[in-house]
Image: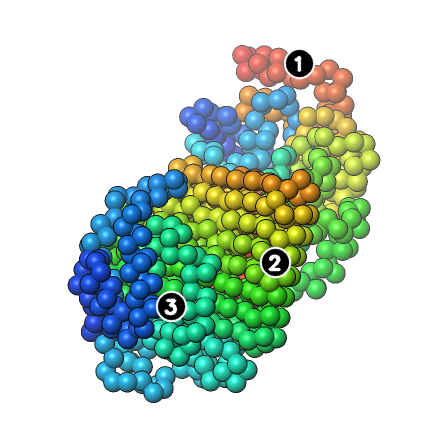
Amino acid sequence: MQRNALLEVRGLTAAVAGVEILKGIELTVRAGEVHAIMGPNGSGKSTFAKVLAGHPAYELTGGDALFDGKSLLRMAPEERARAGFFLAFQYPVEMPGVTNSSFLRLAYNTVQGARGRDELDPLEFDDYVQDKLRLLQIDPAFLERSVNEGFSGGEKKRNEILQMALLEPRLAILDEADSGLDIDALRIVANGVNRLRTPDNAVVLVTHYQRLLNYITPDYVHVMDQGRIIKTGDSQLALELERRGYDWVADEYRARQAA
Amino acid sequence: MSTVLQSLVNQPYKHGFVTEIEADVVPKGLNEDIIRLISAKKHEPDWLLEYRLNAYRHWLTMQEPTWSNVRYPKIDFQDIIYFSAPKPKKKLTSMDEVDPELRRTFEKLGVPLHEQKALAGVAVDVIFDSVSVTTTYKQRLAEVGIVFCSFSEAVRDHPELVRKYLGTVVPPGDNFYAALNSAVFTDGSFCYIPKGVRCPMELSTYFRINTQDTGQFERTLIVAEEGSYVSYLEGCTAPKFDTNQLHAAVVELVALDNAEIKYSTVQNWYAGDENGVGGIYNFVTKRGLCKGVSSKISWTQVETGSAITWKYPSCVLLGDNAVGEFYSVALTNHHQQADTGTKMVHIGRNTRSTIVSKGISAGFSNNSYRGLVKIGAKADNARNYSQCDSMLIGDKCGANTFPYVQVGNSSATVEHEATTSKIGEDQLFYFAQRGVGAEDAVSMIINGFCRDVFTQLPMEFAVEATKLLGLKLEGSVG
């Protein structure tokens, strides 16, 4: 039996500064699935992720995205997060003076509160977060540092996955979670993501390269080009892209469009 | 600037009401007769009248300073009322006899005048326009030998102490506004901590300007004898008027051997409206003299109000091993201008100073840090650490840092760090993506930014300061 769609994107178009970046995206993600969205630089992958999360720089021009049957695009960004939509940022911003522990606890308690669950006091939260730190092999001293300030590339990415682990989203989009990671850090991040998978949630990996997919096997691989998803396949497609590049996919797409 | 940020930093001013009360005012303008009149109204001794007149004559020879990074139309000093006092219905013998209208005013401002209702452990001297209305906990403090009263009472009851220290830290001719204050100061607080006494409660002065066209020129003098300790806090508010009022105070602190004075300010004078009309000109001279060995003076200020702020709470580190500290948060919004900082003057050996300044600018405001670190020739092994951080909210505001360093002794160590950051859309979006709304996000960012300063404030006032930054939702402000 086919599970219900967690995310249904229909004909989504969006522009920034008057230039249309997304030109009609179609995508369905069901609970328990892992999707990978690949494509060359500038194809609109990161824009797609940010539009779903509600970044104010982008203007929606058409289409819709349903999350659990409700229009995601009509919710404020914080409501999307509270509903269980999570974006791991490609470039997490730095917050000087804001300690990671207080930030994580505020985010956690806000999301818990929105779900009608109990909030945790600082001591309870500390117990809870220690488990997640072990999962991602993060030094506890990290909690007392300012959010993302002076973090290495690997630490920033792990901090994103830590937040994902704390907030337990239903749908997580990881934007270039692998960029700038050495092989050990990549493995830690990938293991973390795998451990967080359940039959009820789903993960969308936005990535340039196949190497992350050696550790997290996707059910579907999509190729994005010029603001559209132009091809969908299984994990074999990622290997083929690694071998052959992206041009042939675009050529095929143009040929199909012409026919 | 995003509309969310806009509305968050633009909280309405809650203290802008006017109290209808009959006032005893002197005619507008300034001349020797006005000064004689003020002095006579206060039944002052001759030496003090002389002090005023000398200051006034000196002031006439001085030029208004123009070096600061603030702009305002020329002040007409003849268009200001130099004395305004609420008319007492009869002579007060206890707090309960304070005019009910005044009592209500201060209750509305969160400063109850009844000791049983007052903040536990905080004694307050309450200044309304030109005079002190009342001082709480006077008796209890007197039991340990502490004098805490209005300046006028101090002149009457402890003239020898006032005469000994008045003008020793900020001489009448120190600067244009200090000279003006020395000529016309009307009231303020006086505090004397005897040898070896640790003041058992926070001392505090609450300043309120009520009458339009009135200038407030208060004078505060705190003397901490050998081995004593006091923590002192001042708060300030004023009604909304569309004219500017002048507030030119002088604060002098004297710390003798091993004494410590901690002086905190939460300044929330009316800042003018969103177009920059009205508001207080806050031109203040604050200076502490670490006269004794191992004495310590620490200034903490949270400056959120005033159309223009011009103040540099300073420390003169005369005694060997003396310590000076300056912790500041200055928030400017709309068309507010602030030029504030400190001077750390190292004279004694092994003297140390720390400067932590956090400037937050929003709207069209302009926020400057200006600080001097001066190491004298005899200040062997003197050390200074300065950190000046600026945060911008939006792209129409300005932040400047003007550090001056003069080192006259090669064994000194002076460090200076400065940063500028911006609350951007991306930070708010990051919070939002984790479920946190803009109010909480801005509050957390600002609090994080100001953390090093807020931790220096007494507990209740740290909370108050957070609120004062006007960055919390109406409903969550207690």
Q: Is residue A248 left or right of residue B306?
A: right
Q: Residue at x 32, y 57 (%)?
A: B55
Give the foreground label among 1 and 3.
Answer: 3
Gap in angstroms between the C-alphas marked 1 and 3: 82 Å
In-front residue for pair B255/A93: B255
Gap in angstroms between the C-alphas marked 3 and 2: 27 Å
Quadrant housing residue A176:
top right
Residue A202 in the image, given as x and y percentages of width and height: 67, 43
Q: Are marks 1 and 2 on the same chain?
A: no
Disc on the earlier residue, 3 or 2: 3
Q: Amino acid at mark 2?
A: Gly
Q: Which mark is residue A248?
A: 1
Q: Which residue, given by chain and number where applicable, does mark 3 sit on? A: B188
Give the foreground label among 1 and 2.
Answer: 2
Task: Label 1: state its secondary structure.
Answer: helix
Subunit bearing disc 2: B
Q: Residue at x 77, y 28 (%)?
A: A211
Subunit bearing disc 1: A
Task: Label 2: state its secondary structure.
Answer: loop
Outermost right residue: A184
Residue B253 in the image, given as x and y percentages of width and height: 49, 63
Residue A88 in the image, given as x and y percentages of width and height: 64, 40
Quadrant of the image containing the C terminus of chain B: bottom left
Residue A27 in the image, given as x and y percentages of width and height: 58, 34
Subunit bearing disc 3: B
Q: Residue at x 23, y 76 (%)?
A: B87
- Position of residue B305 relative to residue B209, above or below, is above
In-front residue for pair A164/A236: A164
Q: Are marks 3 and 2 on the same chain?
A: yes
Q: Which residue, given by chain and number where applicable, does mark 2 sit on? A: B319
